[in-house]
Amino acid sequence: MESQKKFAMSPSILAELGDAVSETQIFRDEVTLLCPKHRLLEVLQALRDTQQFDMFTFATCVDYYPGEPRFGILYQLYSTTRNIRVRVKVMLSGNDRSVPSACSVYHAANWPEREMYDLFGIHFEGHPDLRRIMMPPGYEGHPLLKENPAKVEEVAFSFNRARAWEDKPHPQE
Amino acid sequence: MGLEQKLGNMGIVTMSAEKAINWARSNAIWPMLFGLACCAIEMMSTQASHYDMSRFGMELMRASPRQSDLMIVAGRVSRKMAPTLRHLYDQMPDPKWVIAMGDCASCGGVFNNYAVVQGVDEIVPVDVYVAGCPPRPEALIDGILKLQDRIKKEPLTKWN
């Protein structure tokens, strides 16, 4: 198996991507390429066409609140011919939650991007069908943002049982 | 021996209509074939030959809400599933009953989060809550027997 570390340091990849990749992180032989958001599609296109990263594994989002830049958008790619993986990461500010959609490069990015839109409120420019995928259509807000409470209901113990019971919605029949 | 000898001369048996109808209702509850999560596996084994729910007059799990009397909510109800569950409940003909099977259906269980309804009693009226994660088939059968007792005591004035 080709070493992922060797791949990340190879002259061909450095020449190919050049200054589109702002930083290369290697942690336990896992390669992460950080790039600015306006060059994301360029990087993905180059990895797909010239480095044989033919398989889109997943995309996800991390909320680093209260850190800034707040969001990290991750695209995990795999090369079935070379058996190596690479992660492309874009950092986003909390004030500007939009990023170009990778659907034009990898069709498989369609649903993961919808999921990120649904749960984190990230707007993907140029996405063919950007609507909720997990939560019901009428849902308000984006539940995985860190400002939301982790629990929806107070857990009832003996000391707070009456209050917890009062807060519970009871049906009217 | 003829039929006459076997039956004897019983004449007429009298009882209240309330009692007779409650007896008929309680001993032929047809549950709806509706499982939401892992509790449904226990519900299936309750129905299957080892525990055999048909001993209590429930030989038929109906795949249509229009033919069923009992909804066993087996599993956690997500907020996306909640309108569907209510819709199914509304389609069931009266009289109808609901069993919240397991911790998730009763109170949300371990899923104290944005995606899961915190107890199915928020959307449908529940008659019996069965505790357990998941409840064993014996527990579900106990819940059903509790429901049968309840139906047998239902006064005529409370009938739907």
Image (cartoon, rainbow, N blue to C red):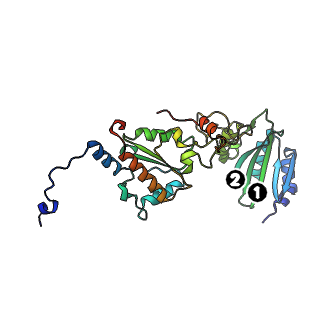
Q: Are marks 2 and 1 in contact (CB under 8 Å)?
A: yes
Precedes in sequence: disc 2 or disc 1: 2
The residue under the point 43% across, 51% down is B146
Q: Quadrant of the N terminus of chain A?
A: bottom right
- Residue at mark 2 to residue at mark 1: CA–CA distance: 9 Å
- Image x and y of residue A113, in percent: 68, 42
Corner quadrant of residue A63 = top right
Judged left or right of residue B88, residue A95 is: right
In depth, the one of A83 and B79 nearer the eye is B79
The residue under the point 49% across, 42% down is B85
Q: Indicate the chain on which mark 1 is placed.
A: A
- Image x and y of residue A170, in percent: 54, 35
Label 1: which secondary element? strand
Q: Is the residue B90 above or below the residue B60 in the image?
A: above
Q: Is the residue B5 above or below the residue B80 in the image?
A: below
Mark seen at residue A85 = 1
Judged left or right of residue B25, residue A162 is: right
- Image x and y of residue A43, in percent: 79, 46
Q: Where does label 2 land, which residue?
A: A57
Amino acid identity at mark 2: Thr
In depth, the one of B89 and A128 nearer the eye is B89
Label 2: which secondary element? strand
Amino acid identity at mark 1: Arg
